[in-house]
Amino acid sequence: MTRIFNFAAGPSAMPLPVLEQAASEMTDWHGVGYSILEMSHRSKEFMGIYRETVEMLRELYGIPEEYEVMFVQGGGHLQFAMIPLNFAVGGIGNYAVDGV
């Protein structure tokens, strides 16, 4: 198989061993009988993944315990929306619904 490397913005090439491990765990994550894509976000398996990931991020980036690690989706649009939310002291703020 010829590997093609994508150097465009956004997704990039992954090492083949990472892709092979992900493929093997796609149908049975660590022997639980189902994929990580099928498990409940409230299950003990998922909460273990969550805790391990938070701890690894804390170690990698030196995030102290007094800060919360948040996992959010949304890309650039969400990041721009979060800027004014950081200024909403006490969760109070005014906003306009503009359809976008």
Image (spheres, rainbow, N blue to C red):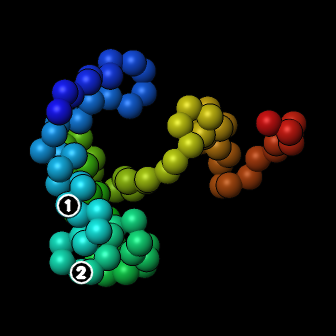
SS for tag 1?
helix
The residue closer to the viewer here, 86 or 48, is 48
Foreground mark, 2 or 1, reads 1
The residue closer to the viewer here, 65 or 97, is 97
The amino acid on which the numbered mark 2 sits, given as a three-letter code, is: Val
Residue 28 vs 26, above or below: the answer is below
Residue 99 x %, y %:
86, 39
Q: Residue 24 carries which label?
A: 1
For the point 37% across and 81% down, the residue is: 43
For the point 39% across and 65% down, the residue is: 37
Q: How many marks?
A: 2
The residue closer to the viewer here, 90 or 95, is 95
Q: Residue 32 carries which label?
A: 2
- Taking the image as shown, residue 12 lies to the left or right of residue 72, namely left
Residue 44 x %, y %:
31, 81
* Image-quadrant location for residue 40: bottom left
SS for tag 2?
loop
* Image-quadrant location for residue 96: top right
Identify the image quadrant of the C terminus.
top right
The amino acid on which the numbered mark 1 sits, given as a three-letter code, is: Ser
Task: Give me the C-alpha separation between circle 2 and circle 1.
Answer: 13 Å
